[in-house]
Amino acid sequence: MSTADPKVLNIPAGVAFADALAEGVIQRWGHDPLTLAKVRILLPNRRACRVLQEAFLRISRARALLLPRLMPLGDLDADELELTSGDVTVDASAETEIPPAIPPLRRQLLLARLIMKWGEVAAADDGVDAPSEDQAVRLAAELASLLDQVETEGLDLRDLKNLVPQEYASHWQITLDFLEILSAQWPAIQAEAGCVGIAERRRLLLEAQAAAWQEIPPDFPIVVAGSTGSIPATAALIKVISSLPQGYVVLPGADVKAGDRAWQAIGTDPSHPQYGLHRLLARLETERSDVGAWSTREESAAAQERAALLATALLPADVTPEWLDAIESMPSEDIAAALEPLQRIDCPGASEEAMVIALLMRQSLEEDGRRAALVTPDRALARRVATELGRWGLTVDDSAGRPLATSRAGSFLRLTAEMIAGKLEPLATLAALKHPMASGGLSRERYLDRLRQMEKLVWRGVRPAPGFSGLLASLDEVSGNPKRDEQKADCRRFIEWLAQTAADFDQTLEAAENLENIIDAHIAFMEALAASDSESGAERIWLGEAGAALANFVDELRDAANSLPYVSRWRYPALLSSLLEGRVVRQSFSSHPRLSILGPLEARLLHPDVMILGGLNEGTWPMEVDSGPWLSRPMRADFNLPSPERRIGLSAHDFAQAASAPRVYITRATRVDGTPTVPSRWLLRLDALLQGLGISEALASEAPDWLAWAEMLDKPDRTSRGKPPAPQPPLAARPRRLSVTRIETWRRDPYALYAREILRLRPLDPIDADPGGAEKGTIIHEILELFLQAYPDRLPADPEGKLLEIGAEVFERAAVRPGLRAFWWPRFLRIAEWFAEAEEAWREQTRRSYPEETGRLVLSAPGGAFELTAKADRIDALRDGSFAILDYKTGRIPTDPEVEMGYAPQLPLEAAMFNAGAFGDLRGEVTHLSYWRLTGGTTAGEMKPLKQSAADSAEAAITGLTNLITRFDNPETPYPAQPRHDRRLRFNDYAHLARIKEWTAGEGGSD
């Protein structure tokens, strides 16, 4: 090559960059294999190196080839900096005397320690809360990002003192005070560790390489390709390369056809896709007219039209009036043809978008050798698409990796921390113990069987007291039978084993020891819990890619642990989660040869046959940018840090390059999680331009088809409306003994009675349930029963005081469920006050009270004897010789129409049973029926006697029951679900079994 050849060259956006780059290298130096092997090519990152290797393989048609040496520059924006400096490869001579990079976790914890000390001082001086450990770690991550930016730009933190604090708000002045402290202490901390920052090391390496080549120009060709020079040190190295005798710079998609006025405006707009290239050309002192073509490959006419349209749509705001000239000069027919390979699909939601993308990728496989890639910064969308592809047996992993925190190994680390730090809070504990890695030294089947027993005995219902002692106390509360006693013994042994296994971890957390000791104890507990009957815990946790990634994280954390002075018990899980942020698990091999899911960073220089750009919503692509918590925008500008909008410019360049692929689909969801979204700013500009051209629908021609096909994927061939269940069990299976409370269920929802009494199904209490009405009712009933047993015919001198005394004893027995007392004791205080006053007035009519009396009445029926049972809350003998039956309600009281129509028959049936002599030695006639509502609310209690006479109520109730028994003694009578919607059960544990919402849809009967 002659020195007259241009040193700065370009590959247009519409040309496959890697293929054109490989082709140009072979054209220039491929005639001599040894010369080709000497060529050195500098690329933005390691992914680009792999892409170029594949391109050489395609261009050479798989013939043997000594490849040039491919070197990654690590040309990433500081906010995108990898957690390693290994992406920067330079000559060994340039690495001498450059300190190693400080490990990321160590730096984060050291910065967190400085933040915590600063926070403690600020808290003492100003009375504000000091940041907790996890908050300090999150702030440290942002501070580390700021340090990366400062080091990338070659700035000096000590220059912060030149900023004038009075020009900023007061809270920024406080921040500046801390940053000045940091600028004084941080260099000494790094020097003591013998390290430098990751970005600093990268900058030093690049500067050393530039100096070495400038001093002694190499005698082999050097090509730097695909870089926009966004990092100053990279731009300086590129300038040196451009001045070398055999140095070449290959630009990615520079717009050499833009008008002078537009190009000038681009230089002042950091959010423009060409902004980085504009700055790089200015640094290289190269005019666009001097930029040559690297390859003989040229864009097609349609690709050139599309590139011109995109360039026009993305013009800086200052020159958008040029749209009018562009609209006049662009034939709409030619533009429409050029846009045919560019399609846009707006989907109703995120799941529909993922399905459409999966269909597009699946369809691309129908053509031999065709490659397709999804490019999106939305990792949630990437995971959805990977899942949808699984329906066709296609495994495609996200190249950006899966979050370590949500991997099997990572989640086990987090959940076990939450379990012990939270003192066995039920949901966190069950999440940890049910984790797929947990086995407790048993086979997985035996372990899960024991865990299910424990869940039903201990964790269902109101929360136990904290710790293992609370679990054992709750277990002792469980009433027993021979089978239950055996289950309790198994559970006790398991709880005791857990307590012994977790003892060291629990004690270390309680003592708030240093982080290294806590981690060691935590890992020992994890491994013990993960062990099975055939494998050790270490084998189960640390194997595989996620296990290896977690092992690396734990090793780094242990090495850096001494950097954090202490960790409190309650903050340890949040601290772990904070430190895990940004950690990913990557596949070590490609999952599919022709399909890829990439982030914009990984997709640079890639040019598949089908390019799918997903998640094109504002805030997703481009991402929202802010100045961070440490410096405001004016402070950043005064400190000579680049504008945050520069990241949008880099994203815009990624978008423009990707949108120039041979076939492009742009997708977005109009709603995400139910919230309306705004299209990406680039799409809005493109829409406006196309509307001006009169072809606003040019990008949407295929959208209806793809949306329809996606909808059809899960649409059944036909649908049939469910029918209400109407089981007809044989007469022998139908219940012959029911309590008066079950009669109400029978009347309102026979299917619920069928499920409970015939199928013998019992609902499980919720895990960690709030103390509900049932628990409250049980406690209040017990207190009043004890009170009436102690004072059946004469009240004590201080009835309220005695009630409170009895209540305290009952609530004390419920101390193993601490939520009960905390929730209901204040209400009971109000109930006791009301009850004492009401009881004194009521006792003027009574001779004696009989609490919790049981009754039994046998009725003749076509199907045989039917036994009705009852347990009356209270039967009072009145002074006139008659009796009253009272029913305590801690919730809603039935209305009089409900009682009279037989939908709330409890009290009238108890009256009928009493009149028939069903309550043992108590004989007489009931003349008074009343509900006593005891809520402890604003109105603590109230008496509500029935309007209908007790005699009429009792007669109607027993007649209605007799008719009901007779009807259901006919084997052909079904047990329907919810026969009358307006009289349905207020709380129905079996509604889901009856699938009520399925067959009531459209009737206005859905709950």
Image (cartoon, rainbow, N blue to C red):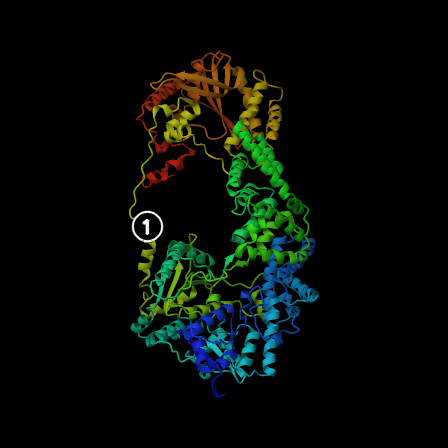
**Residue in view at x 44 percent, y 58 percent:** 382
* Residue 19 percent across, percent down from the top left: 42, 74
Residue plotted at (43% across, 27% down) = 894
Q: Residue at x 41, y 70 (%)?
A: 607
Please indicate, yes or no, whether residue 769 appears anywhere in the rendered image: no
> Which amino acid, mark 1?
Lys
Residue 842: percent from the left, percent from the top? Answer: 53, 19
Q: Is residue 712 left or right of residue 227?
A: left
Is residue 887 placed above or below 553 in the rendered structure? above
229 above or below 901?
below
User: Can residue 366 be seen?
Assistant: yes
* Figure quadrant of the C terminus: top left
Q: Which residue is mark 1?
A: 715
Query: For numbered disc 1, what is the local secondary structure?
Result: loop
Q: Give the answer, above or below, for where 977 lies relative to 607.
A: above
Tell which of 876 and 200 is nearer to you: 200
For label 1, the crowd category at 10 Å Cα-Cα, with few meaning under 14, some 14 to 19 and many 20 or more, is: few
* Relative depth, front residue between 491 and 856: 491
Q: Quadrant of residue 381?
A: bottom left
- Residue 67: x, y in percent? 49, 75
| Count of numbered circles in the view | 1
Q: Nearer the viewer, residue 861 or 622?
A: 861
Is 99 or 788 nearer to us in this picture?
A: 99
Image x and y of residue 822, in percent: 58, 36
Q: Is residue 758 left or right of residue 972?
A: right
880 relative position to 169: left or right? left
Q: Is residue 431 left or right of residue 904?
A: right
